[in-house]
């Protein structure tokens, strides 16, 4: 399908006005920046036309434009001519099955204030947000550090999304053809509170750059029934969901008792459980920001639930580390499971002996019993950086047949974290069930009896014999 115009930008006249005669308006600068960005992405200079609400006399025919970008503000929403143009474009583009309308938010405007036609369109927020106060304002200096974090990242997103739409329009808009063009994994990147929009944007850009389809690809509804249905539908298409949790609890849809952020996590947990039962691939990564000093009481309660509630953690790995480390973990998680190095199946069953470095000497007698019983012992890594150590831990969690946690000099918090890791192991891409779990340790172990663990007191004279019995049952 051929178009004379690649991108048509429409806006309210007031949004391109300047205080000084020699200054370029906001829309004029936006067009220039988008042109440069699309040139890099497309490899050829795009034909971009800007059209104000008063420019109808010289406006090109709408059916000659491939993409419509609306600079959405309150002035735009109140302009009959602007809204008529949007409506006319939707009618001309109705035959194609892909999204050809994008909205750029130059300043804050709520969903209720947006024209109904544009509420579900993908939005790109290009105004400045103060993380401390929550105050928002338009950018005037497009080359400031703040603009780099938000304006330019959103511009990159917009350029990539326009590029994909143009590719599909040129190749054909039949749904099956679209699928043939993009043979990629689909990932659900959950919407976040306003404080993590930049971080989400970083993750989204990297995923798209590496060839993944990222959902949701539309603005979520503010109505509970609609948004729940939409999230469930998107999750069903995905093999992984990523959730970024910060200080902001997020907006609560009308008719709901929890925020969008909270709701997405709940529905992803339900999806993980359902797909686990039908042996479909689905895992979850939850990243919690390290700085939560501005979190509300409700957000703190939500995060506390995430860390403690096994239902909320269904199929999930929860991390609270620097964003760069999390991005590395995302890359590792997305490696094709067929390319991962697995254990030699001919080596028989394996036991992951989970212990800390401080207990190396105390754990040796138990390790010898396991090896003499014919099992391969998987051990945690203690050398290398944090990421390498964790990578080995994840590989062990994915591949063990049974697990034994050893509690020596470590505290109860360490043990609880390891028990939690075993609960979360199915979410790391395991292809087989866990056949047995035990806790060998000193002190009072009664509090772990409801964790589906075989308890073996290591200070008992019969500790090694009890371990042998556990291993024999495990073999059987």
Image (spheres, rainbow, N blue to C red):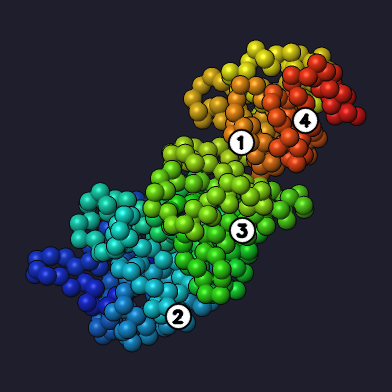
Sequence-wise, which precedes: disc 4 or disc 1? 1
Mark 2 surroundings within 10 Å by alpha-carbon count, few (fewer than 14), some (14 through 19), many (20 or more): few
Residue that mark 2 sits on: 116
Q: Distance between the residues labelled 3 and 2?
A: 28 Å
Total labels drawn: 4
Residue 1 location (% of width, % of height) = 48, 68
Tell me whether the residue at label 3 lies in contact with that at label 4, contact meaning CB atoms closer than 8 angstroms.
no
Sequence-wise, which precedes: disc 4 or disc 2? 2
Q: In this view, does 54 lie to the left or right of 42?
A: left
The correct choice, above or below, for 49 with respect to 301 in the image is below
Residue that mark 4 sits on: 455
Tell me whether the residue at label 4 lies in contact with that at label 1, contact meaning CB atoms closer than 8 angstroms.
no
Q: How far apart are marks 1 and 3 (CA)?
A: 22 Å
Residue 272 location (% of width, % of height) = 68, 52
> Residue at the location (19% across, 68% down)?
25
Helix, strand, or loop for circle 3? helix
Residue that mark 3 sits on: 266
Q: In this view, does 129 lie to the left or right of 288?
A: left
């Amino acid at each position: 399908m051929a178009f004379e115009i690649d991108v048509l930008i429409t806006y309210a006249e007031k949004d391109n006005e300047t205080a000084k005669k020699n200054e370029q308006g906001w829309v004029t600068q936006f067009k220039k920046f988008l042109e440069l960005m699309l040139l890099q992405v497309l490899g050829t200079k795009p034909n971009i036309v800007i059209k104000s609400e008063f420019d109808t006399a010289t406006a090109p025919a709408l059916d000659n434009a491939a993409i419509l970008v609306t600079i959405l503000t309150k002035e735009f929403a109140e302009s009959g001519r602007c809204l008529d143009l949007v409506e006319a474009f939707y009618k001309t583009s109705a035959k194609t099955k892909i999204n050809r309308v994008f909205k750029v938010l130059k300043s804050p405007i709520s969903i209720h204030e947006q024209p109904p036609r544009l509420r579900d369109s993908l939005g790109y927020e290009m105004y400045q947000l103060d993380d401390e106060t929550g105050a928002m304002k338009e950018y005037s200096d497009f080359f400031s550090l703040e603009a780099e974090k938000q304006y330019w990242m959103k511009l990159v997103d917009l350029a990539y999304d326009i590029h994909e739409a143009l590719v599909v329009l040129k190749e054909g808009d039949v749904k099956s053809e679209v699928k043939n063009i993009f043979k990629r994994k689909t990932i659900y990147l959950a919407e976040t509170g306003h404080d993590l929009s930049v971080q989400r944007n970083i993750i989204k850009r990297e995923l798209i750059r590496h060839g993944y389809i990222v959902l949701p690809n539309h603005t979520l509804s503010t109505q509970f029934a609609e948004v729940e249905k939409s999230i469930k539908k998107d999750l069903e298409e995905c093999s992984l969901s990523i959730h970024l949790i910060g200080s902001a609890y997020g907006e609560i849809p009308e008719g709901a008792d929890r925020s969008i952020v909270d709701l997405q996590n709940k529905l992803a947990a339900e999806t993980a459980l359902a797909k686990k039962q039908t042996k479909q691939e689905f895992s979850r990564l939850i990243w919690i920001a390290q700085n939560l000093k501005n979190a509300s009481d409700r957000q703190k309660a939500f995060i506390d639930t995430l860390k403690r509630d096994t239902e909320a953690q269904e199929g999930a790995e929860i991390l609270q580390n620097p964003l760069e480390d999390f991005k590395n973990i995302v890359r590792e998680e997305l490696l094709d499971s067929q390319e991962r190095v697995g254990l030699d199946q001919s080596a028989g069953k394996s036991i992951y002996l989970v212990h800390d470095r401080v207990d190396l000497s105390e754990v040796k007698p138990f390790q010898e019993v396991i090896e003499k019983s014919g099992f391969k012992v998987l051990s945690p890594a203690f050398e290398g950086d944090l990421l390498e150590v964790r990578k080995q831990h994840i590989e062990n969690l994915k591949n063990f047949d049974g697990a034994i946690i050893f509690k020596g000099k470590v505290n109860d918090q360490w043990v609880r974290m390891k028990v939690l890791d075993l609960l979360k192991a199915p979410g790391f891409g395991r292809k087989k069930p866990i056949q047995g779990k035990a806790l060998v340790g000193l002190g009072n172990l009664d509090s772990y009896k409801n964790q589906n663990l075989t308890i073996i007191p290591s200070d008992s004279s019969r500790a090694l014999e009890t371990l042998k019995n556990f291993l024999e049952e495990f073999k059987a």
